[in-house]
């Protein structure tokens, strides 16, 4: 719409819009300029003016009146834009979903002792890839190799930036141009459309599928071995289960077959357990130690699931195979950074002492929390919400949470939840406003109510969550 076709009333409103220069010269914006770069402040002012200009031109019903076309209105919108652009978007959140390893919320919570011990290094230089004795350059994987071998019994170890990268690197280093045998029941897909067949193709290995979706026998592997076969690959189905009439070949049998034919045996465990989960009332999850003891040449897993450290991909096993992996060109492209290695080394140290692990590691502390403790926390949360938001309807109920991140997908964790209902807000809107609140509170919706699962909360977060509900309370 050209200016000559704009009705007089709208033209009058457009003329009343303050200029950017006038706003920049004002006292309010002067305060912003003391804290923020001038180009950023200018952009926010221009965007706020542009939004209001478009509203005036599009306002066919005439609701955008003179009360909106004020300097204060423009400054308010510009201030909101400036706050959004300068806010850290990866920030602290309260996880009240009951999913302990919540991928979207960063998976494992790092132990406080780990974070405290990292602070000095994060503020300065660190000994990432240097030998303190000689002063010469060294390999960064040495920072964690010793403790990984100690905990798992591996001959050698290295770490890359995630388990998908670990799988890709191992296949590329040990099977490129040759065949890799895998059961059809293990052709996994994980989050982000990561599919094992696609990774196989990208690595340069030729995937040979054997068996059926639900049943694979040793004879299927035996019949698939040719002169072009390099390895047998087992993928542990950590994020799904095939139940009923099923069969998979035990790792020990696959190892015996692979080694009798001169092949490499790879075991992708996914979640990367280093301790038995039976202690926490959960089913057994294969550990890295068990895979190596069974004879697997290389074991890969995530480091931010059941290890509960930074994002990374663990690669442990026989020294000759690990050396080939380390020296492959892809290894540099996938290597872990200093933050990953610092957090991983310190977190692994907790696994030396099972009791220390439960006391200090949030993942295992959450798993070990007794029902009476959860009930007490839920009651405290309900009381705090009732005091802060008197109009809220509140119930303390038994509930079910999950480990998350594809770990033990069929296992539910008994817990207690606080269900909250506000008459003026439907559950979806209440949950949205809690996410957008300064507390950044994430809950879930169940049976038409917002529920807060206290297993993934701390006692210190109880008053913070109650205050958040009070702020969104209409």
Image: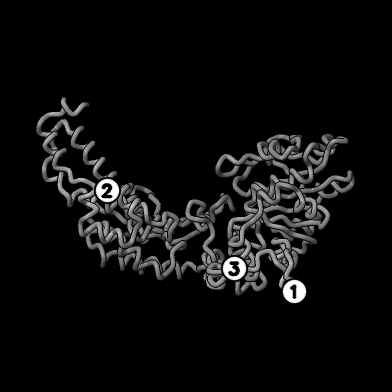
Check disc 2 and report the residue beneath it.
Answer: 45
SS at circle 1 = loop
- Decide which of tag 1 and tag 3 comes sooner along the chain: 3
Give the Cα distance between marks 2 and 1: 56 Å
SS at circle 3 = loop
| Residue 279 vertical placement versus 265 (above, below) | below
At which x and y percent is residue 301? Answer: 67, 53
Quadrant location, the N terminus:
top left
Q: Are marks 1 and 3 in contact (CB under 8 Å)?
A: no
| Residue 396 vertical placement versus 205 (above, below) | below
The residue positioned 32% from the left and 49% from the top of the image is 427
Q: Are marks 2 and 1 in contact (CB under 8 Å)?
A: no
Instruction: Please rate how many residues cluster around mark 1, counting C-alpha atoms within 10 Å: few if below 14, some from 14 to 19, many from 20.
Output: few
At which x and y percent is residue 338? Answer: 61, 62
SS at circle 2 = helix
Q: How many labels, in total? A: 3
Q: Of 335 and 374, which appears nearest the observer?
A: 335
Check disc 1 and report the residue beneath it.
Answer: 133
Check disc 3 and report the residue beneath it.
Answer: 125
Q: Is residue 240 left or right of residue 46?
A: right
Q: Of 437 and 374, which appears nearest the observer?
A: 437
Give the Cα distance between marks 3 and 2: 39 Å
The residue positioned 63% from the left and 62% from the top of the image is 341
Q: Is residue 192 left or right of residue 218?
A: left
């Amino acid at each position: 719409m050209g200016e000559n076709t704009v009705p007089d009333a709208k033209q009058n409103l457009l003329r009343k819009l303050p200029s950017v220069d006038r706003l920049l010269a004002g006292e309010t914006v002067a305060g912003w300029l003391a804290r923020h770069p001038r180009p950023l402040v200018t952009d926010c002012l221009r965007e706020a003016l542009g939004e209001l200009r478009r509203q005036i031109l599009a306002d066919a019903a005439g609701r955008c009146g003179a009360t909106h076309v004020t300097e204060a209105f423009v400054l308010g919108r510009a201030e909101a834009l400036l706050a959004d652009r300068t806010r850290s978007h990866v920030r602290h959140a309260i996880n009240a979903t009951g999913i302990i390893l919540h991928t979207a919320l960063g998976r494992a919570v790092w132990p406080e002792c780990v974070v405290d011990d990292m602070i000095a290094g994060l503020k300065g230089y660190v000994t990432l890839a240097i030998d303190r004795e000689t002063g010469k350059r060294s390999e960064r994987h040495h920072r964690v190799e010793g403790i990984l071998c100690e905990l798992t019994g591996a001959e050698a170890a290295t770490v890359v930036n995630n388990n998908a990268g670990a799988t890709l690197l191992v296949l590329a280093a040990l099977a490129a141009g040759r065949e890799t045998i895998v059961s059809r029941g293990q052709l996994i897909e994980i989050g982000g459309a990561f599919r094992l067949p696609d990774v196989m193709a990208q690595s340069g290995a030729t995937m040979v599928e054997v068996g059926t979706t639900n049943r694979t026998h040793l004879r299927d592997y035996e019949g698939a071995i040719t002169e072009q076969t390099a390895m047998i690959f087992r993928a542990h189905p950590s994020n799904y289960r095939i139940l009923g009439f099923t069969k998979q070949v035990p790792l020990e049998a696959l190892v015996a077959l692979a080694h009798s034919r001169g092949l490499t045996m790879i075991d992708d465990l996914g979640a990367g357990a280093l301790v038995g989960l039976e202690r926490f009332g959960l089913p057994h999850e294969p550990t890295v130690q068990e895979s190596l003891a069974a004879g697997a040449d290389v074991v890969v897993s995530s480091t931010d699931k059941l290890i509960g450290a930074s994002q990374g991909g663990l690669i442990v096993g026989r020294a000759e195979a690990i050396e080939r992996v380390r020296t492959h060109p892809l290894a540099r492209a996938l290597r872990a950074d200093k933050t990953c290695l610092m957090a991983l080394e310190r977190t692994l140290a907790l696994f030396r002492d099972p009791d220390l692990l439960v006391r200090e590691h949030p993942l295992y502390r959450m798993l070990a929390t007794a029902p009476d403790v959860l009930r007490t926390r839920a009651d405290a949360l309900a009381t705090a919400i009732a005091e802060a938001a008197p109009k809220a309807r509140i119930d303390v109920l038994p509930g079910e949470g999950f480990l998350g991140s594809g770990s033990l997908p069929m296992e539910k964790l008994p817990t207690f939840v606080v269900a909250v209902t506000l008459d003026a807000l439907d559950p979806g809107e209440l949950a949205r406003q809690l996410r957008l609140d300064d507390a950044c509170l994430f809950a879930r919706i169940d049976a038409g109510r917002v529920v807060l699962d206290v297993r993934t909360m701390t006692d210190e977060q109880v008053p913070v969550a109650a205050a958040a509900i009070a702020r969104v309370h209409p």
